[in-house]
Amino acid sequence: MVIIQKYTCKWMAKCVYLKLLSATTFIQYCYRQLHAKKELQQLKQEAMKLSIKPIGDSKTNHLEERGNDTIQGMKK
C-alpha cells in the first residue's frame, strides 16, 4: 500500500510541475510577443520619421536589397 501511495504522489507532483512549466512557457511567449510587437511599431514609427517607406516584411526587404546590389555589381 505504501508503494502505491509513493508512486501516486510522485505522479501527481510531476503532473503539477508539468502544468506549471506549461503555464510559465505560455506567459513567456505572450510577453515576448507583446515586446516584439511594440519594438516593431517603434521601428516603423522611426522609419516614417526618416521618410523611409517600408516595403513588406524584413525578409522581403533584405532580398530586394541584395538583388539590387547583385544586379548593379554585374552591370559595372
Image (tube, grey):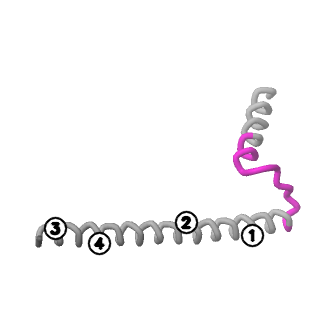
Q: Which residue is mark 1?
A: 42
Task: Give the foreground label among 4 and 2.
Answer: 4
CB under 8 Å between discs 4 and 3: no
Side of 26 relative to 13 (left or right): right
Q: Could you tell me the amino acid type at mark 3?
A: Ile
Q: CA distance from mark 3 to mark 1?
A: 57 Å
Q: Nearer the viewer, residue 18 or 63?
A: 18
- Residue 13 disc label: 4
Left/right of residue 47 with respect to residue 13 in the rendered view: right
**Residue 6's spot in the image, x, y percent?**
16, 71
Please report whichever mark, 1 or 2, sits nearer to the chain's N-terminal start.
2
Q: Secondary structure at mark 1?
A: helix
Looking at marks 4 and 3 on the same chain, the residue that comes earlier in the sequence is marked by: 3
Marks 1 and 2, how far apart in space? Answer: 20 Å
In the picture as drawn, the residue positioned furthest to the front comes out as 1
* Label 4 to label 3: alpha-carbon separation: 14 Å
The amino acid sitting under disc 4 is Ala
The residue at which mark 3 appears reads as 4
| Residue ID for mark 2 | 29
Chain-order first, disc 4 or disc 1? 4
Query: For the residue marked with disc 1, what is the amino acid?
Result: Gln
